[in-house]
Amino acid sequence: MFRSSVSSNDDERRFRIGQRFSRVSFLALTVSLFSATCLIFDPADAQSPAPGDAVQTASPDKSDKKASPTSGAPGTEADSPPVTPELKGSLRRDLNAAADLMMDGKYSEAADLYRSVLNVNSKETNALAGLGMALGRQFKLDAADEQFERLLSIDPTNPVAHCGKAMVLLNRLQSSNNTVIKSRTAILKEAGKECNLALDADPRVVEAHYLLGRVYKEEGRNDRACQAFMGAIKLDPHYSNAYAQLGLVQVLLNKLSEASESFKKAITINSGNSTAHFGMAQVAFKQNRLEAAVAELNISLYQNPNSSPVHQLLGKVYEAQGNTVAAIKEFKEAIRIKPELPGPYLSIASVAESRGDMEMAIAELHAGLELIPNEPELLIRLANDSLRIDKFDDAIKNFELAEAAAPNTAAPLEGMTRAIYLKAQKEASGAYFASNDCAKANILVQRAIKANPSSVELRLVDAKLKALSGQVVNVAKIPLPQSDAERPAYAECLMAQGRYNEATEQMFRAINSNNDSAKLLAIGDLALMIHDLPSAELAYKRASSFGQSERANRGMDLIFKAREEAKQNLNLANDLARSRQFPSSIDKFRLAAYQDPKVADTHLFFAQTLEKMSEQSTKTMRETIAQYKAYLELAPGVPASTQDKLQKRVAKLESKVLKIEQSASQPGQPKPSLLQRLSTL
């Protein structure tokens, strides 16, 4: 949440002061509320109540012994000390002066004035509300909450008090305290309850609508957040922060033109609204207007230097401009302000990854996890970076931790099966890999599917896992991708079954139909991670055509390096095979096939070398079968005679493996004696 300066516009100030509803301390003091006053109005101001007024103040001609409509407190002399007309005027002046101080952002001085009023009349509800808001604006949350509790003890349905308590709860969420972070859901629920209590007391309370919108926004209920913010704007068309928050939600909903209009209205009302300038920067960044984004962010930082999200976005803009040094500086500043947010750690890791410095990326992610243990985003990113440097066991462990932190979700399970697949390709017999990793992953996947039976992503993960375990996958039961976003996962599933050409088709469709450079780079990075080099090359080239040439070129360099290493290992494997050093040769063939699995000749030479091994176990024969099938899948224009010969060879090997496995599964039969054999002649 960003704090906004109070507008000094006299017309706006007169508009707010002239409203009968004592927006009191409330609007002037909430975290994002700059737009209010807490006054006992002059009789002239009180003659024409404005629409939406909820909390009334006692008219000057009323006896102090009678309870005011605001407080609902008993009006006996024992309950409240008598106030002379002169003193009453003094209290009014103090309350007016305190409201002016609130408008000027001088919250500590305003709090002192409110206390002086309460020293004379401890049950002055406007002073209680004002003091609570002044303390809340200074983030003295416990003290603020105490004042609102005192106000509720006098008037249990006081809407300002309930709004104040909601404000305090929302402000608590800005704390870096782990207890608060873990209680986030409960705190938001309680804040929503307080907003509803305020609305039950008076549905015209602007701030209750506004704060309820903030609760919905924090909960990710963006449509309802829009409704709440628009409700606040309908009641108060001059509410700058409501427009700013509405714009932020519209950005989340990708309604950029509507968001831009909301931010412009917020700035027109209050040019010092740092949140609105931040929002304008978000829109500009999404539209690739980087210079405009920097200008808006600098304005926002001038108004509010200690905003972690603003530094975070400024870092992203610098990164997009290629200024990675400045980007990292901004990300570090964001971490200094709010170390418990995962975004800046992920951003620094992204810069390091783009440089090819995986060790730096991993170190930064570990630093984030020290402060935010079991954060799924950090764990998944750490696992994926571990995969990029072939640390399979580390990757699997971190995917498991991410799944435990966010159970029954597709992303960590998809990553886990990817890690198992890559480990199988490099270290085991072809794609078929039965291990404890597969068994654990299968339990987690089945549990997730039971919880989310309609999830296409989880069904694809299940199919990929079955293929990795050597099970027959029913092609008809594999869910077809419903969108381009699902095609890469579908392609991974096909690659695990050795259906390389179909996988390539799916990847190419996803890439060629995409015009978003960030998404294209993400597809390229994924394809590079699973060593689908042709798909990675296409994705990076297309991203380059949309203005990401520098980032794409770094990806192309990694592809070139992977291909060169694969060629070197293939040549070395063939040399070792010719020298009949078959075990060493097979290791190199396996590594070459792992580094660039869509090269047909690698699989053919690998299979032929495997058959030259003196010891032919079922494991070796299965790997030979997998390599011949991969060659037949990938080799373009194989002569029909060669294709028929290899298919017969595969069928013969499969029959032999089946017989051996069936024989091993049957109980041993004693061999007949010589006499028995002779008697059968």
Image (spheres, grey):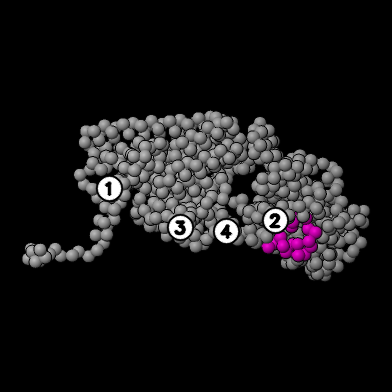
Residue labelled with disc 1 = 620
Contact check, label 2 and label 3, Cβ < 8 Å: no
For the residue pair 9 and 211, the one nearer the viewer reads as 211
Query: Looking at numbered disc 4 in the image, what kind of residue is underneath it?
Result: Ser
Tell us which disc is closer to us: 3 or 4. Answer: 3
Q: Earlier in the sequence, mark 2 or mark 3?
A: 2
Q: Residues within 10 Å of mark 3 (few under 14, many from 20)?
A: many
For the residue pair 63 and 217, the one nearer the viewer reads as 217
Tell me if residue 77 can be seen. Answer: no
Q: Residues within 10 Å of mark 4 (few under 14, many from 20)?
A: few
Residue labelled with disc 4 = 183
Contact check, label 2 and label 4, Cβ < 8 Å: no
Residue labelled with disc 2 = 224
In the displayed structure image, the side of residue 554 where residue 294 appears, left or right: right
Q: Earlier in the sequence, mark 2 or mark 4?
A: 4
SS class, disc 1: helix
Contact check, label 3 and label 1, Cβ < 8 Å: no
Q: CA distance from mark 1 to mark 4?
A: 54 Å
Residue 120, horizontal then vertical, whole percent? 79, 59
Q: Residues within 10 Å of mark 2 (few under 14, many from 20)?
A: some
Q: Earlier in the sequence, mark 2 or mark 1?
A: 2
Q: Is residue 249 above or below residue 582?
A: below
Q: Earlier in the sequence, mark 1 or mark 4?
A: 4
Residue range corresponding to the magenta coloring: 193-210
Query: Looking at numbered disc 1 in the image, what kind of residue is underneath it?
Result: Thr
Query: Looking at numbered disc 2 in the image, what kind of residue is underneath it?
Result: Arg
**Dominant secondary structure of the magenta stretch?**
helix
Residue labelled with disc 3 = 445
